[in-house]
Image: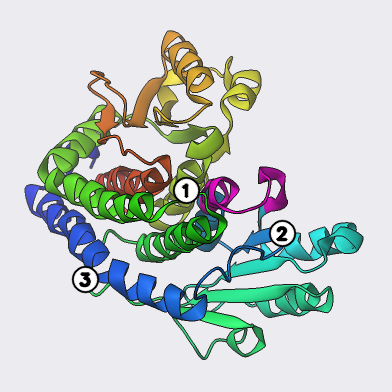
Amino acid sequence: MNAQDITSASAAALPPLIRHYSTVTAALLPTLCRQIENLFPGDCLKNTGRILLVGSGEDYAAALAGRSVFSSLSSYPAEWVEALTPTALRHFIEREKLQLGSAFVIAIDCAGDDGQLPHAVREAQSTGAKVLLLTARADCPAAALCDWLLSLPAAGAPLLPETEHFFVSYLALLLLGRAMGLASGKLCDKKAGELLDEIADHIDTVSQQAEDLCARARQVAESCADAADIDIIASGRDYPAGYLARMLCYRRLGQVVTLEESEDWLHVNMLALDPHRFLTLFFVSGANSSMDRTLRTIAFAKELGRQVVTVTDMDDHDPLALALPASRYSWVTPLSQLIPAALLVEMLRLSRPF
């Protein structure tokens, strides 16, 4: 069995899952906004202290993506916003204790099963930090320790496998950043309203392209039938999407893959032999300041004979490009990047005999 054995019946199950992202977004937006307004009325989020986003697995991917949101919309300089795993937070606290003060820790544990998080929360609070927990399980071990709890609702409809936690967690972070932007004055009421509309409209536009995205992902999987290994390359704001894609490969394909920044990939892998053994997956968005270096790396990879696949919101007529519409707000892009990434992983999984 090879990638050309993807059955129509198997592939036909995927477009409805993509269309659900639109209905899920429409349902979750008012629910999450209402919770955030109740937790943090007025300008409560204006002077929170240093912002530390903490999570594991897909929750860490959401934290990575959320870093650019809070760097842009909080009252603090970008270097005061960090994305960390629970273990990294404990090391960070030890190193930065004298400077940490009243930090604002946003802990993400959608599934409520992160065994390391309670220890990290206790250590953060010992320095005077305040902790907000984002979780779908109000009875999880970390919940009783935290100062605030934002309840993450279930999607309410099936989505592509292994994507719900990231999608809901990052949506909550994006809306929390929006509230912080209003409190800090970085967003006016009009812009905050436009951001809400853009989130809903952008995901709806992507959902309407479900059939085309599935057809393109199937074509890519069939074209890369001989690729035994996968490299993922992403830089800057696109890196969280690459991190999530690597996690999906672990969980859905049972395959260890590499994830590297564009320059690191050039230094380590440029001269790798047997280029046709590799499917090389790039994430590149037009609003990313690292876009140019990623595009240069794509050109080098093609010259080497690599099978290059791009997830992009730029005009790309390459037959192996998984194209997305561009969003007016770059913070929205991570919500849509996961859809073609997860879709491609599913098509690759369907092509395998195990």
Q: Position of residue 97 (x, y in %)?
A: 88, 63
Q: Identify the amino acid type marked 3.
A: Ala
Front-most of 111 and 238?
Answer: 238
**109 or 194, which lies in front?**
194
- In the rendered view, does 151 fall on the left or right side of 52? left
Label 2, residues with CA under 10 Å away: few <14, some 14-19, many ≥20 = many
Quickly name the residue at label 2: 50
Which of labels 2 and 1 is toward the front?
2
Who comes first in sequence, dot 1 or dot 3?
3
* Magenta stretch encompasses residue 322: no
| Vertical placement of residue 119 versus 218, above or below | below
The residue under the point 31% across, 25% down is 314
Residue at the location (39% across, 51% down)?
253
- SS class of the residue under badge 2? loop
Residue 106 drawn above or below residue 194 = below
> Looking at numbered disc 1 in the image, what kind of residue is underneath it?
Gln
Which residues are drawn in magenta? 66-81
